[in-house]
Amino acid sequence: MATLDSKIPDGTIAEKWNNFKAHQNLVNPANKRKLEILVVGSGLAGAAAAASLGELGFKVKCFCIQDSPRRAHSIAAQGGINAAKNYPNDGDTIYRLFYDTVKGGDYRAREANVYRLAEVSNNIIDQCVAQGVPFAREYGGLLDNRSFGGALVSRTFYARGQTGQQLLLGAYSALNKEISKGSVKMYTRREMLDLVLVDGRARGIITRNTMTGEIERHAGHAVILATGGYGNVFFLSTNAMNSNGSAAWQCYKKGAYFGNPCFVQIHPTCIPVHGDYQSKLTLMSESLRNDGRIWVPKNKEDAQKIQKGELKPTDIKEEDRDYYLERRYPAFGNLTPRDVASRAAKERCDAGYGVGSTGLAVYLDFADAIKRLGKDVIEARYGNLFQMYEKIVDDNPYETPMMIYPAIHYTMGGIWVDYELQTTIPGLFAGGEANFSDHGANRLGASALMQGLADGYFVLPYTVQHYLADQINVPFFKTDTPEFDKAEKDVREKLEKLLSIKGSKTVDSIHKKLGLIMWDHVGMARNKEGLEKAITEIRELRKEFWKEVKVPGSLKGVNVELEKATRVADFLELGELMAIDALDREESCGGHFREEYQTEEGEAMRNDEKFMYVSAWKFKGEDLDPELLKESLNYENIEVKTRNYKEAKS
Amino acid sequence: MNLTLKIWRQAGPNEQGKFVNYPVSDISPDSSFLEMLDILNEQLVEKGEEPVAFDHDCREGICGTCSLYINGRPHGPDTAITTCQLHMRKFKDGDTITIEPWRAKPFPVIRDLIVDRSSFDEIMQAGGFISVDTGGVPDANAIPISKVDADLAMDAAACIGCGACVAACKNASAMLFVSAKVSQFALLPQGKIEAKRRVQKMVAKMDELGFGNCTNTYACEAECPKEIQVTNIARMNREFLVAKLTDRVK
């Protein structure tokens, strides 16, 4: 019987991380040169980890699927990064950031990890400023803050609407510094296709060079997975086109448990879907909810006229507008957490009050803010977002309200890790969105950047070193071993199989079908019947894929369709696990909303007695049911209660 | 909309390339340019032909992956956007649209519309960073920075490294790209410490990689999707000159 050990250090919550560091094993500088680490992914977590480990003296190889590490999807994060600096003197503390994050996650995150995250958050801001990240500043020259959902303080640091870009470029510059010194070797345009185990430990990876088609072997003493989330299982999401879950999925199939796969974040403020040719959804930053007010018409007749194009939003009188977030959640208003705001939008649209030609949209209105602050101030705050909106929708948001609707954005679930961010495979670590650890069932805005950089700069450099301390006598690995031979053979066979099917369905057509199944049944609202249906349909679709998919070209050179096919093959398995997990969790919490478990007012009903655990799924073999292991969650420093965003009391 | 696409096809880095015409029909004016190419590629795959290879990722104008020289302009006919943000409503029914890769010696074509921009990474590795290691840094508010400088640094830092400036320039100059990073750091106190070393190293690498010089046509600024200004080039030239004249390290 497999067990889970989350390896939480002793001491009070505030002492744990210090205790770990005080007692951890270290490697002396001369020995660090003898140890090689493979970092897969070059986003915030990957680039920060690779750079920091390189600085320490380890030999690091870093891999990314993009043509440059600067293009990892962290770059698209807009709004900001949280930290408990309390620069605005508004009552923030490390405890409060910890508290808000655990509460925001609906009490499904591990306390000790979240406390450490809050603790190192301040170091992140210091580090980024030292790297030259141009955060927004006040006229006095000090750093500016703004508010994000789920918090009553202003603790979000930002660089216009491009915070993710600036933080990633900061980590990229640290990475470049190490590349120039030779401590990090960068491999771009590489896709990880398998993990190689030697004697039960993670010792290498198989990659494909997406330009030459070459299958390559890389060995190391440890592997860090920082490959982001799997939101693209839904086909339409705010993720970049190449974001995928395949590297994580291969690790799952090699023995790493998958934590809380059903916890997916649906972001309330995205540009609505407009046609079946659409390839992705665009996020409008949560920061817009600082000044924008969300509403739909109060009267159904008005909504219907708007849908038909007979009325414009500006025709609706103030008293005929329903600012439903302000109405339902007076304390937090438009700044309720994402899961709450998303469900509220869906509720209004399902009830027939939605706007836009499809009726699947709500307004985000800046008229009041423009009246109060002036157009200049709004332009300075959100200019790039307004421009982005205008280019896509062909509407001017300064004059008419934006239309928004929820979309798949982030996956809280991911590879299960212990306190040291080590997976259930010794020597395999996971950081950033790729792991499950810090956000519970719902992530608060501006916390993804915080977690990525916390893992990369301040956690993995310690914990990976701790693991490697007893490996100093293990020589550099060769890749001409039976383990690598087998892994490469398996990869080649899978790719050749995909090329040989020569069916009649394109990869995208199957991916779109999967996306619809996921959105309908494993999306914003789920129920037993729908989830069971989804599982059956995904299994059928998987069969269809392996019988009917059409992948032109060969293994050699650029073959984009082959890349997509390997990812969709994995999504067709991952999607099923998400549905299985959602079916098991008979409660509503955070982003996971089971229609059977709601209050009369339509609020989520958690079941702490039965479900206060992390679901960790173990792979048992192809076409076999996975095994569920439960990590029970203990809250010793927070009183667990029903989330309440109606009142200011915390 | 019905359109004719005249697309550069090239099987590999050392193969001869050529234009191939493809008709596409029933394109929605609200679809993006890359979605229009997706539709073409779906049709090609269905026919068993190899799809057109092009670089793209975030599709919201920030990652800098997409490129494409459309009707003679980097990122196409609109201003201040990347190709992925270009929408078909900017074209007319019946148009013929010419699509080429970036054309510059330091950006060799890999396949079809994909080029190799690793030379940009090499320039950054030569000095596009502040040499601080993780940990042991001062408090973020320890050094106040004037809002004007911080804003100017942010203007320069907005560069997405797409390479449109090089593609637009008749000399294939990378001055706008390099000067954006040099400016960002030169404007901030944290970056001033190694400013002289940085500008010399980055310029030397840029020259070594075969990028041309700036002859002040401002084509780069006109085509930059992030509206990075040529004043950054002027700032880099000043930084470079001062560094050459006053650097105590020879």
Image: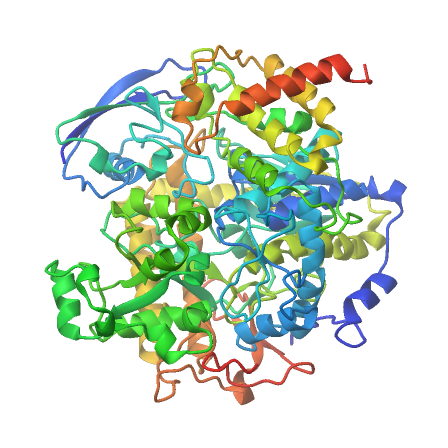
Where, by quadrant of the figure, is residue B239 drawn? top right
* Relative side of A206 to A386, left or right: right
So how many labels did they put on this image? 0
Closer to us: B242 or A488: B242
In the rendered image, the vertical position of residue B223 relative to residue A386, given as above or below: above
Q: Name the foreground residue: B153 vs A83.
A: B153
Frontmost residue, B92 versus A427: B92
Q: In this view, does B235 lie to the left or right of A427?
A: left
The image position of residue B182, as x and y in percent, is 62, 27
The residue shown at (47%, 56%) is A230
Whether residue A316 is visible: yes
Image x and y of residue A106, in percent: 53, 76
Quadrant where the N terminus of chain A is found in the figure: bottom right
Instruction: State which quadrant residue A172 falls in.
Output: top right
B123 with respect to B160 (left or right): right
Q: Where is residue B210 in the image (x, y as percent from the top left)?
A: 56, 12
**Residue A42 in view here:** no
Q: Quadrant of residue A434?
A: bottom right
Colour style of the rendered protein structure: rainbow
**Quadrant of the rendering where the C terminus of chain A is positioned:** bottom right
| Residue A594, percent from left and from top | 39, 79
Residue at 48% across, 43% down: A493
